[in-house]
Amino acid sequence: MDPQSSNTQNTNDIEFEDAEFHSVPNAAEHLRNPTSDNHVRLDDQTDKRLYILETYAKKSGFSARKGGEHHSGGIIKTKYFVCSKEGHKPLAFDDPYSKLSKPYKSRNRPTIRIGCKAQIKLCSTDGVLYKVDKFVQAHNHSFVCPKDMHLLPAYRHLSETQEEMIWDLGTLNLGPVKVFNIMRQRYGCFENVGATKDDCKNFRARIHSYIGEYDADMIINRLTNKKQFMVDYSFVHLVDEHKRLIGLFYADGLCKRNYAEFGDVISFDATFKTNKYKMVFVPFTGIDNHCRNVTLGAGLLASESIESYKWLLQSFLDSFGKQPKVVVTDQDPSMKQAIEAVFDKSRHKLCMWHIMKKVADKVGHELCNNEDFKTRMCDIVWTDSIAPETFEREWKLIMIEFCLTENKWIDDMFGMRSSWIPAFYRHEPMSGLMRTTSRSESENHFFCQVANSQLTLVEFFNHFDGAMDAQRFNHRKNDHISRNTTPDNWSETTLEDDAMKIYTRSIFADQQAELYGTLSECLPMETKIEEPFLKISMKDWKAHGDGLLEICFKKGEDVIASRSCHRFEQYGLLCKHIYFVFKMFKVKEIPNKYVMRRWTKDVVPNDLNNTFDLSVDDNDGHKKAKEVAYEIMQTGESLIGNLMRDFDHLVIVRDRMREMKEMVDELRITKPIDPMFDRYSRLIGYEKPDTDAPPTVRVPTSIKNKGRVLEGQASAADKKGKKRRVIQLETDPGLVDEEDEEEETGEGEKEYEEVDEADDSDSEWEELNDDDE
């Protein structure tokens, strides 16, 4: 029978394929006959009779919803279930005077209601058992094509697996529309997804609604649990007089272990647009044994004031117990004063790149393009081996020659030369590891790839945890490569073999280049004996200036070597000049005193990840279920991969999986469905308080910082668009239309409100007995 050929549907022609319906061969007659034993328990949301009603509507080509009900004596006496096209859209009162005050034209929203009379009436005397009292079968509309049934709201829904997929991929900064496109590509077509793009948007909107004003409270409770259950976990927060969150610092046990080994030099810088509250994200960055970035802790601040940075640095110091040797920042004055107050024993270095970037603006582009000026400036600014007195002499000569003696900015930079010129801190241990904040900027870029300006704090922390997992996985991968691969030996010397055994691959590459430099770049000039040392003068063809260096050497049980280039002090690694002398005097192994632990292969064993990574989830059953689910998905993908060219066996696997699905569907009927908020709580890992009490810690508000475009600086078009958007939000809750296409970028997505398919539709069959949701 063609459903489109008539305005009524003969339900006697419907056949139910499910074995459950064999006991009800004529579903329409079963529903229509009020004398039959058609009792249903209305408070039982899994009753099979209700499943029959839903399946009947779906197979007929329409959807249904809950209608009205009549109460008497505190119980529901009569309950109606009607076609979703029942009733009519309320007529809006057309007031020409009110239109004058409207700032924009309202949308013309269609309706699905056309007065259909099809319905089922249930009656009861005791409020527990209900009997079918009336069944109107005729519809006044055509039915939906079977291929379009998935577009009806009643039959569109995201499964728990799909919800989890949207959430998990969101931690990679993939928005709901991108995830929907991934699902429809993965499932083969739009129809197989079982939902639309707007359903994915609405899921995210519901998550945000669930989090609501408890955003900061959830974070504080979660971090408090981590501090209680995880080894050596630190976290501290700060609130203002209105109990709004204005500061947060956190670091786990592995961060502290990394700081113990790699905390000699750190860099930190403010990152913007990582959350919806405009809180500044401040990661503390070090350099690990592979010369890669390692995160040592992080903070969130509501402002970039001096007091805020002081609080953050003091929290860092309280958690780690010691100050770093060197701290690198940009020229932010708030950071500078905070470091001087809290890290009073640390050497504060300014970012050379930020200073040199301003030279063109301060001295003029014409002079800055002068090749002689650029070459001479770079030679004295960026070179490690130049002596401080040589730098001062050359700087003054350049200023005189290029008429810059009256330039105030140049004088200021010369006055703070000890804070940014390598010549003035080359004796500072490990000071050469960072000259600029490029490490922090690289770290900021890394975290911004998984963050955007629309994230709640709950989402931000989940994204941050995912980014940290990726960083630590890369560290383990580099450890594996260093331990289980053997690089080529260029010089075939015992010193190179020894360096290969000690250092990680990236550090060995540096030492290998130094050893190679002993063959072509070093030439001994003169040797003097000054007991107990030998003083060796050497010519380095690639060194600054005349390239003359001096090495003091003493051979014996305690090999001692010192050199004027100070590379070991700056980087913790030997230079080619020392290696040249070692080769001269037959030193076959690198002395232990010249091997820094921070560059070795096993400085932080990989098994420490398991030591510090303890679960704080209350629902261990859900975690175990996820592990089993991942195994099932991997098994399914393996079967598909092995049988793609064996069609017969692939069909056998499909049929068996269908049988299992039908069995699970039957079990699902008798198993209660988890309430929506319970699913959300389990999914995001944060639980909302059961009470309606206000949050203990409130979300930040009205935050302005220098990294954001101020309202007054926005363009007129942007202001107009934002104003119109605000008016829409206030007057129209059905913000998302079917035709709206989401523009997703790496910076994040827009905030969405839930879409109304029709402004007057009520709850569908999927919400039949889930009123709590």
Image: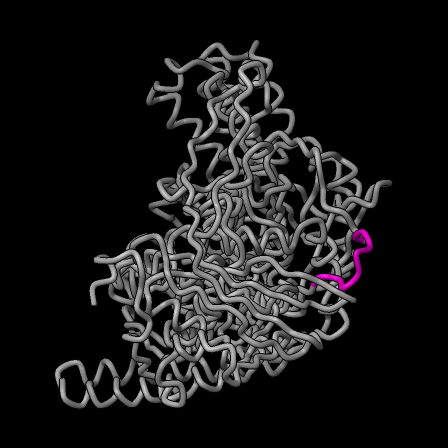
Residues 116 and 681: in front is: 116
Please provide percent x and percent y for residue 42. Answer: 61, 74
The image position of residue 40, as x and y in percent, is 57, 79
Residue under the point 52% across and 21% down: 719
Can residue 273 be seen from the camera position used here? yes
Q: Is residue 222 left or right of residue 510?
A: right
**Is residue 198 shown in magenta?**
no
Q: Is residue 696 left or right of residue 520?
A: right
> Residue 748's x, y, as percent?
46, 44
Locate the C terminus by quadrant: bottom right
Q: Is residue 625 above or below residue 573?
A: below
Q: At 48% across and 41% down in the image, what residue appears?
A: 89
Q: Position of residue 121 (x, y in %)?
A: 54, 66
Residue 693 falls within the magenta-colored stretch: yes
Taken as a whole, is the magenta stretch helix, strand or loop? loop
Q: How many marks?
A: 0
Residue sitting nearer the eye, 674 or 264:
674
Residue under the point 68% across and 67% down:
76
Q: Quadrant of the rendered structure where residue 772 is?
A: bottom right
In the image, 212 versus 367, the foreground residue is: 212
- Residue 713 falls in image quadrant: top right
How did the renderer colour the structure? Answer: one colour
Residue 140 or 35: which is nearer the viewer?
Answer: 35
What is the quadrant of the N terminus in the image? bottom left
Using residue 100 as the reference point, say whether residue 224 is left or right of it: right
Residue 255 visible (yes or no): no
The extreme front residue here reads 35
Magenta residues (range): 688-695
Image quadrant of residue 319?
bottom right
